[in-house]
Amino acid sequence: MKVTIEPVWKAILAEEFEKPYFKNLMEFVSSEYNSTDCFPPQEQIFSAFNHTPFDEVKVVIIGQDPYHDFGQAHGLCFSVNEGVKIPPSLKNIYEGIRTDVGSPVPEGGNLKRWADQGVLLLNATLTVRAHQAGSHKSKGWEKFTDAVIEKLSDEREGIVFMLWGNYAKKMGKKIDRSKHEVIETIHPSPLSVNKNKEGWFGIKQFSAANDYLITKGKEKIIW
């Protein structure tokens, strides 16, 4: 499978693409896409990188794997295509923004507008079989996305990493917190939020992210 990715990311990750695990991963993904329904569409697997070039990343949000029903996933974590019903976790994200910064809740669930402002919407696993959550887990994607986080931590400064839930927190253990801002909280899924609403709605994380960006001379995100 050919990797189509933004040029600076391609250069930054060049060594990763040559490693045996990544070549094996691409063979697996190609076989899966040729034999069954998988998401996102093949040309959108690396959309997060193509919408948010390496040098433009201001915020990183980490998800687990893509939505696994038809028409939903398009390569950005927590985001769905226009016209698709807003998933429960994204509803809580939107409500968290509304209660924090006062923005009205959008009618659609496409987060491309965030990605184009410098929010890297990165799933730990970039592909999935239809209707089988976690089906491409532990095939090599996690090594790749760990490398992405490490490159951002080591070679950039002043990024906000928003780590939602234990899975994202685990991925963020190697972030250099002397160079970056890390905001940790619960996952926005209803299961987590309904148990601890203050842990999601009470921490004002979206305004905190913008406050940090402003201290670094960067434009805030219009959530």
Image: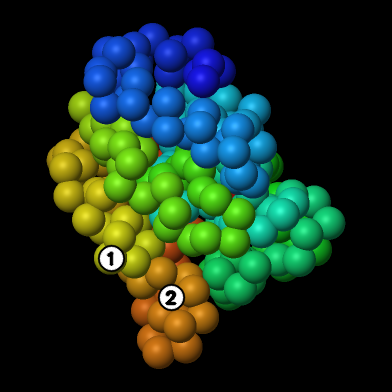
In the rendered view, would you say 209 is above or below 19?
A: below
Residue sitting nearer the eye, 115 or 3: 3
Give residue 140's quadrant in the image. Answer: top left
**What SS does tag 1 mark?**
helix
**Element marked by disc 2:** helix
In the image, 44: left or right of 20?
A: right
- Image position, residue 67 (x, y; %): 58, 56
In this view of the protein, which residue sits in the foreground, 182 or 47? 47
Residue at x 35% of width, y 21% of height: 23
Mark 1, other Cα within 10 Å: few <14 / some 14–19 / many ≥20: few
Location of residue 87 in the rendering, given as x and y in whole percent from the top left corner = 65, 68
The colour scheme used to paint the residues is: rainbow
Residue that numbered label 2 is attached to: 200
Instruction: Identify which residue, 69 or 95, lies in the foreground.
Output: 69
Disc 2 crowd rating (10 Å Cα; few below 14, some 14-19, many 20+) is many
**Mark 1 lies on residue:** 166
Q: CA distance from mark 1 to mark 2?
A: 14 Å
Q: Residue at x 21, y 42 (%)?
A: 175
x%, y% of residue 32?
A: 52, 38
The residue depicted at 26 percent of the width and 49 percent of the height is: 171
